[in-house]
């Protein structure tokens, strides 16, 4: 990696360094593959028993606001995934807040990212609020 980078022109070297940083670091944005496929399977099972009655089977309709789609993204695009995690953990399910484990909330947040068309990656979304705060929640354009 280093040898390749030192031989190329300045502009390309900069691009190379940026790519390297992005690969080495944790996801900085929800677009960077912040959750994986196994996690959304778990999230979907929990969602079906704890959230679906109010938020609807596809996360988009029900007596409660949508958790996927343009309206939801407009509410959350300026915040971090950690902010969404905290709000969900502290207030949801509305009839029994804070009743799930951090891991279960993280699994459901992964499902919400998936439903908003953020791509899956290799690693799971961490069940650690401090680390989730580092991941920006911005819209796919
Ligand atoms: C008893 C009905 C009910 C259940 C069950 C429920 N919710 Fe909610 N949810 C609501 C209502 C009503 C609101 C709107 C008021 C609010 O934001 O507190 C809401 C709001 C939200 C929001 C904020 C949406 C936004 O755009 O600001 C999130 C995120 C959320 N719920 C996630 C969940 C998750 C995840 C679960 C399952 C663990 C869940 N809810 C279960 C009724 C429910």
Image (cartoon, rainbow, N blue to C red):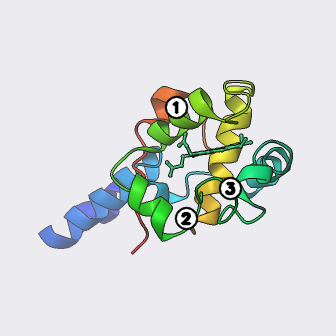
**Res. 3 image quadrant:** bottom left
Residue 122 visible (yes or no): no
Q: Earlier in the sequence, mark 1 or mark 3?
A: 3
* Disc number for residue 76: none
Label 3: which secondary element: loop
Q: How far apart in space, not on screen, are marks 1 and 3 (Cα)?
A: 22 Å
Q: How far apart in space, not on screen, are marks 3 and 2 (Cα)?
A: 25 Å
Q: Residue at x 57, y 27 (%)?
A: 90
Label 1: which secondary element: helix
What residue is pinned by disc 3?
A: 63
Q: Residue at x 74, y 35 (%)?
A: 104
What residue is pinned by disc 1?
A: 86
The relative height of residue 85 versus residue 11 in the rendered view (above or below) is above
Ligand 1 position by quadrant: top right
Q: How far apart in space, not on screen, are marks 2 and 1 (Cα)?
A: 19 Å
Please indicate whether residue 134 sits to the left or right of residue 61 in the image: left
Nearest the eye: 127 or 109 = 109
The relative height of residue 104 versus residue 20 in the rendered view (above or below) is above
Label 2: which secondary element: loop
Nearest the eye: 5 or 23 = 23
Nearest the eye: 25 or 8 = 25
Please indicate whether residue 68 sits to the left or right of residue 52 in the image: left
Please indicate whether residue 116 sits to the left or right of residue 97 in the image: left
Give the quadrant of the C terminus: bottom left
Q: Few, some or many C-alpha atoms within 10 Å of disc 1 (few <14, some 14-19, many ≥20)?
A: some
């Amino acid at each position: 990696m280093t040898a390749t980078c030192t031989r190329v022109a300045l502009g390309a070297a900069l691009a190379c360094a940026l790519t390297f940083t992005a690969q080495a670091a944790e996801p900085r944005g929800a677009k960077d593959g912040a959750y994986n496929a196994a996690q959304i399977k778990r999230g979907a099972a929990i969602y079906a028993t704890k959230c679906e009655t109010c938020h609807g089977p596809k996360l988009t309709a029900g007596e409660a606001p949508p958790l996927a789609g343009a309206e939801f993204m407009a509410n959350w695009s300026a915040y971090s995934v950690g902010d969404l995690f905290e709000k969900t953990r502290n207030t949801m399910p509305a009839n029994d807040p804070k009743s799930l484990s951090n891991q279960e909330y993280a699994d459901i947040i992964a499902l919400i990212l998936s439903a908003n068309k953020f791509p899956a990656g290799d690693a799971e979304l961490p069940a650690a609020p401090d680390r989730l705060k580092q991941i920006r929640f911005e819209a796919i354009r």
